[in-house]
Image (spheres, rainbow, N blue to C red):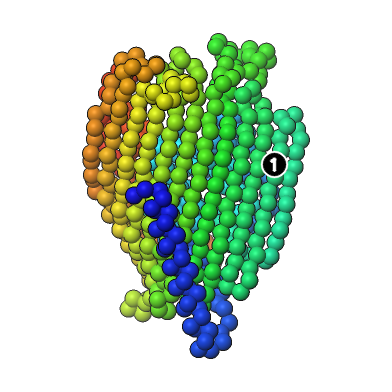
C-alpha cells in the first residue's frame, strides 16, 4: 500500500470516527440535556498495571517538579533502569534505556510506547527520548519484566515504558512559553505549550527546540520537535487526530586522536578524529482513532497510523567500514482495534482486554562510499516485515485483597529480505550479495500473575511469563562477515521469566 493511499485511508477513518461521535452526541443531546461524563483518555493498555508485575508510575507532579530534567534523567532515578549515552550526552540525545541489563541490545529489548502505541522501528535504533517534548508528558508508566509482551508483542523482554501525553480535553486554556540560553557550549532551549477547548472539541500543541555546540569537537546538536492533537469528546465516546514531527542533527566526535591515550584527558580533552561524522534523523507520524461505549462496561477502541523515518549518517573513517554513507527510510503502517470489557464472572469483578494488532514495515537502506556516491550505492537493502497478532488478557478480583491475571498472545511474523550489490560502485571491494529470504513464523507470549495486599501499604506479587523478540534488520544485514553473503536469517529470541517480590 502506497503512502498516499494509506494517508487517504487514515483520513477517511478519522473523518468517520469524528462523524460517528459527533452524530451520536447530537442524537443523545436531543433526547434530554445531560452533563458530560468524566473524561478518561484511553491511552494505555496497562491501566493500573499488569497484575503480578513490578510497576511504577512517574506522575505529572513529579515531572513538573523537575523542569530541567530530561525524560532519560527521570527514568534513570527508577530502580532497575540504566541509561547509556554514546554521543557525548548533549541534552541526553542518543541515550539508550536499559531494563534488566541487556547492555548493547537494550534498545531491542526495552519497548517504549507513546500513548500505548509502539514507536519502535524494525531497525536497531530505539526512539530518541529527547524528541518527545517534556512539556507534553502527562505521566510515564513503567512495567518491569517480559509480561508486557502479551499486550504489546515483541521487544518487551526487558520491560515496557509507556509515555502518556497530555490531552487538550484535560487541560485549561493555556499558552505558555519557556526558554533559556547560555553556558560555554552556546546551549539554547525553548518550549511552547498551547491548549484549549470549546464544548466537546479540544486541541493541544507542544513544541521543543534544542541547540548546543556540545563539549566535544563535532558534537553539536540541532533539534526541533513537536506534537499536536485535535480531539472531540462526546457522551458515549471520543475521536482524535494526532500529528508529530521531529528533526535532529547530531555530530559524532569519536576518538580524541588515533592513539587515544589517557594523557589526552589533559592534552586533548575535547578533540576528535572524526570531524565530519554525523547522523541526521527526521520522523513524521499521523495517528487517528476513536473510542465508543458499546454498552455499560464495554468500550471499543480503534486507532491506526503511519510513521515515517528518514535517516542519513556519515562515518568518514575508511578503516572501519568500506562504505561510509548510509541512507535509510522506514515506513510503518499500523491498525490496532481492541475491546475493554468490565464485567462480573460468577459475581466476581473482572476486566478483559482483547484485540488485534497489525503492523507492516517497509525498510530501504542504501550503503555507499560517500554522499557524493549515493546515487550508486554498494548495497541496496530492501526488507518488508508484517505482523498480525491477537491477544487476550483477563484480570479477576478473586478477593477484595487479591487479584489474579492470565493472558496469551499469538503473533504471525512474515519477512521478505533482498540485497542488490553494484559491483561497479565506488567502494565495492568484492562485496557479496545477500541471499534472498522469504520467511513466516508463528510466535506466542504468555502471562500469569497474582497479587495479594495485606494492607494499603504492603503487598506481595508473583508472575510467570514467556516473551519473544525477532531480530532487527541491522542484525540481519550484519549477520555475515565482510566478503560473505548474509542470509538475513536469524532465530527469534525467547524469554521465560519467573519473578516474585513485595511492594
Residue 23: percent from left, percent from top: 47, 77
Q: Quadrant of residue 130?
A: top right
Q: Is residue 354 left or right of residue 205?
A: left
Q: Nearer the viewer, residue 460 or 80?
A: 80
Most distant residue in the top direction = 259
Q: Is residue 352 left or right of residue 205?
A: left
The reply to whether residue 2 is visible in this rendering is yes
Most distant residue in the right direction = 182
Which residue corresponds to the image point at 73% horizontal and 45% vertical from the top-left? 179
Q: Nearer the viewer, residue 485 or 203?
A: 203
Which residue corresponds to the image point at 63% horizontal and 68% vertical from the top-left? 197
Which residue corresponds to the image point at 60% horizontal and 63% vertical from the top-left? 203
Total labels drawn: 1
Residue 314: percent from left, percent from top: 50, 25
Q: Quadrant of residue 164?
A: bottom right
Against 319, residue 457 (above or below) is: below
Q: Residues within 10 Å of mark 1 (few under 14, many from 20)?
A: some
Q: Nearer the viewer, residue 244 or 44?
A: 244
Q: Quadrant of residue 37?
A: bottom right
Residue 439: percent from left, percent from top: 23, 41
Most distant residue in the bottom direction = 32
Q: Which residue is mark 1?
A: 189
Q: Nearer the viewer, residue 105 or 411?
A: 411
The reply to whether residue 500 is visible in this rendering is no
Against 270, residue 416 (above or below) is: below
Could you say whether the residue bearing mark 1 is in a helix, strand or loop? Answer: strand
Q: Is residue 454 left or right of residue 190?
A: left
Residue 372: percent from left, percent from top: 48, 21
Which residue corresponds to the image point at 57% horizontal and 37% vertical from the top-left? 248
Amino acid at each position: 500500500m502506497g503512502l498516499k493511499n494509506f494517508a487517504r485511508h487514515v483520513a477517511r477513518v478519522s473523518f468517520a470516527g469524528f462523524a460517528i461521535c459527533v452524530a451520536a452526541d447530537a442524537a443523545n443531546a436531543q433526547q434530554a440535556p445531560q452533563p458530560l461524563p468524566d473524561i478518561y483518555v484511553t491511552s494505555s493498555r496497562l491501566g493500573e498495571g499488569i497484575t503480578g508485575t513490578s510497576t511504577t508510575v512517574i506522575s505529572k507532579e513529579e515531572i513538573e517538579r523537575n523542569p530541567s530534567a530530561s525524560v532519560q534523567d527521570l527514568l534513570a532515578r527508577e530502580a532497575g533502569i540504566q541509561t547509556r549515552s554514546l554521543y557525548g550526552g548533549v541534552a541526553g540525545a542518543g541515550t539508550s534505556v536499559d531494563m534488566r541489563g541487556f547492555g548493547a541490545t537494550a534498545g531491542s529489548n526495552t519497548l517504549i510506547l507513546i500513548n500505548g502505541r509502539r514507536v519502535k522501528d524494525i531497525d536497531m535504533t530505539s526512539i530518541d527520548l529527547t524528541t518527545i517534548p517534556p512539556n507534553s508528558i502527562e505521566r510515564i508508566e513503567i512495567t518491569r519484566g517480559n509480561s508486557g509482551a502479551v499486550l504489546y508483542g515483541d521487544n518487551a523482554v526487558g520491560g515496557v515504558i509507556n509515555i502518556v501525553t497530555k490531552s487538550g480535553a484535560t487541560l485549561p486554556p493555556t499558552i505558555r512559553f519557556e526558554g533559556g540560553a547560555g553556558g560555554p557550549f552556546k546551549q539554547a532551549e525553548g518550549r511552547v505549550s498551547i491548549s484549549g477547548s470549546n464544548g466537546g472539541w479540544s486541541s493541544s500543541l507542544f513544541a521543543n527546540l534544542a541547540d548546543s555546540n556540545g563539549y566535544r569537537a563535532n558534537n553539536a546538536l540541532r533539534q526541533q520537535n513537536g506534537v499536536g492533537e485535535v480531539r472531540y469528546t462526546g457522551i458515549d465516546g471520543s475521536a482524535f487526530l494526532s500529528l508529530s514531527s521531529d528533526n535532529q542533527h547530531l555530530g559524532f566526535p569519536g576518538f580524541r586522536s588515533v592513539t587515544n591515550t589517557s594523557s589526552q584527558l589533559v592534552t586533548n580533552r575535547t578533540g576528535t578524529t572524526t570531524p565530519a561524522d554525523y547522523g541526521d534523523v527526521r520522523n513524521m507520524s499521523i495517528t487517528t482513532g476513536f473510542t465508543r461505549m458499546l454498552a455499560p462496561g464495554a468500550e471499543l477502541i480503534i486507532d491506526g497510523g503511519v510513521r515515517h523515518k528518514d535517516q542519513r549518517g556519515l562515518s568518514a573513517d575508511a578503516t572501519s567500514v568500506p562504505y561510509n554513507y548510509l541512507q535509510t527510510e522506514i515506513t510503518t503502517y499500523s491498525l490496532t482495534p481492541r475491546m475493554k470489557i468490565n464485567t462480573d464472572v460468577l459475581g466476581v469483578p473482572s476486566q478483559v482486554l482483547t484485540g488485534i494488532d497489525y503492523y507492516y514495515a517497509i525498510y530501504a537502506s542504501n550503503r555507499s562510499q560517500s554522499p557524493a556516491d549515493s546515487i550508486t550505492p554498494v548495497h541496496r537493502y530492501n526488507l518488508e516485515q508484517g505482523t498480525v497478532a491477537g491477544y487476550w488478557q483477563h484480570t479477576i478480583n478473586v478477593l477484595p485483597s487479591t487479584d489474579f491475571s492470565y493472558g496469551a498472545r499469538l503473533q504471525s511474523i512474515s519477512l521478505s529480505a533482498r540485497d542488490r550489490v553494484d559491483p561497479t560502485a565506488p567502494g565495492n571491494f568484492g562485496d557479496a550479495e545477500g541471499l534472498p529470504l522469504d520467511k513466516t513464523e508463528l510466535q506466542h507470549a504468555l502471562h500469569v500473575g497474582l497479587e495479594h495486599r495485606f494492607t494499603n501499604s504492603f503487598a506481595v506479587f508473583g508472575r510467570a511469563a514467556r516473551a519473544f523478540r525477532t531480530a532487527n534488520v541491522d542484525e540481519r544485514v550484519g549477520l555475515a562477515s565482510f566478503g560473505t553473503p548474509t542470509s538475513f536469517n536469524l532465530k527469534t529470541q525467547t524469554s521465560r521469566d519467573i519473578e516474585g517480590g513485595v511492594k
